[in-house]
Image (cartoon, grey):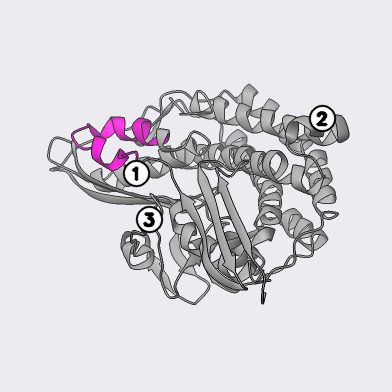
Amino acid sequence: MSAVNVNVNVHHVTRVEGHGDIVVDVKNGEIKECRFEVVEAPRFFEAFVRGRPYYELSHITSRICGICSVGHATTSLRATEKALGVEPSEQTVLLRKLNFHGEMIDSHVLHTYYLVAPDFLGVGSVIPLVETHREVVERALRIKKLSGDVCAMIGGRHTHPCAMTVGGFTHLPTEAELREMRQRFVDARADMDETIALFSTLPWPEFERETEYVSLTKEEEYAFIDGAITTSDGFSYPIEDYRQVTNEWCVPFSTAKWAKHNRDSYMVGALARFNNNYDQLHPRAKEAAAKLGLKPVVTNPFLNSAAQAIEMVHCIEDGIEIMDQLLTRGIQPEEPPEVKLNGGGEGVGSCDVPRGILFHNYVYDENGVCVEANCIIPTNQNMANLNHDMQELVPQ
């Protein structure tokens, strides 16, 4: 880069879920500045859940992210259930997993089709994509509609679910609704096949940078809800020890905290899950990965979007199997369990939401009122890693 001068100042970056700036300043081949700045105002969710009763927290914290509201609600409920000694039923666990699959598909189709695909297909946004690749947009809309409908069937509505509560649900899907949804999932296999076929043709940027990948893991399934915190560097922790992994700190140019564990940064999200949990993927998802040429360990961060496409295939297939289990068992008219406060307590919930591993940590007093809260968001955990990717990519 000798004698090269580059100045990039993007305020704000478009087609991202949030607000951020890119600052790059190269003078005579020397990098003076190279960073991604998060410029959103702090929102103080951890402060305003204090003083609120336990049954409100999942509804409040789902507002941290509309796209990931099911993930935040589920993580919040798991933290509260652990704090107050509530054990959800097997039916509740299955319904939460199916609900989670719906949100995972919803977020991934938004990112891969609406935000990423236009760059690869040579247009400025998804709007002109209707003229140049109408079938791609129609496919995205079908997948988006399916994902929203399954979340609404279980959670009462997709964004900010109203039927999820501590220990269970206030509303349950009927067996007829489940049978219809199962058939729609089967029909969606064609759209999944076309998604993988499209992504196999995309000219992915060539860039490799090894880093630490952090996700939840379970021996018996591809982990989205609960599990152990696992890193590609060989570390494993119970969820309650999350602070040993996140080690948050502040940087002057970002309102989002940074995080690091064994190295100076780590990555969370679909690619981290793919690298750590490949063996637990559904066989059809492994076939999709083979068509995309992906097998762990993948160190090209641009292929996070390809990993999201693979996860959509997994969620469709696992969703079908979950609905089969529910239909075989029959939907039981369960009421949410009685919550016995027993003097309060502390609990940590963790889910691997679309953008990566999420933590909610609550302390409740003897009246079931929250007195302390800590929420660590996956996008924050990715910030240091994203900046280090930029610093290695720019000189190339």
The answer to whether residue 52 is magenta is: yes
Q: Is residue 345 left or right of residue 391?
A: left
Which of the two labelled residues, at mark 1 and mark 2, occupies the earlier sequence position? 1
Q: Nearer the viewer, residue 8 or 101?
A: 8
Magenta-colored span: 42-62
Disc 1 to disc 3, C-alpha distance: 33 Å
In this rendering, the answer to whether 326 lies above or below 204 is: above
Under mark 3, the amino acid is: Lys
Under mark 2, the amino acid is: Val
Q: Which mark is residue 87?
A: 1
Quarter holding the C terminus is bottom right
Q: Which mark is residue 130?
A: 2
Q: Which mark is residue 77?
A: none
In this rendering, the answer to whether 333 lies above or below 294 is: above
Task: Give the residue drawn at x 38%, y 66%.
Answer: 245
Quarter holding the N terminus is bottom right
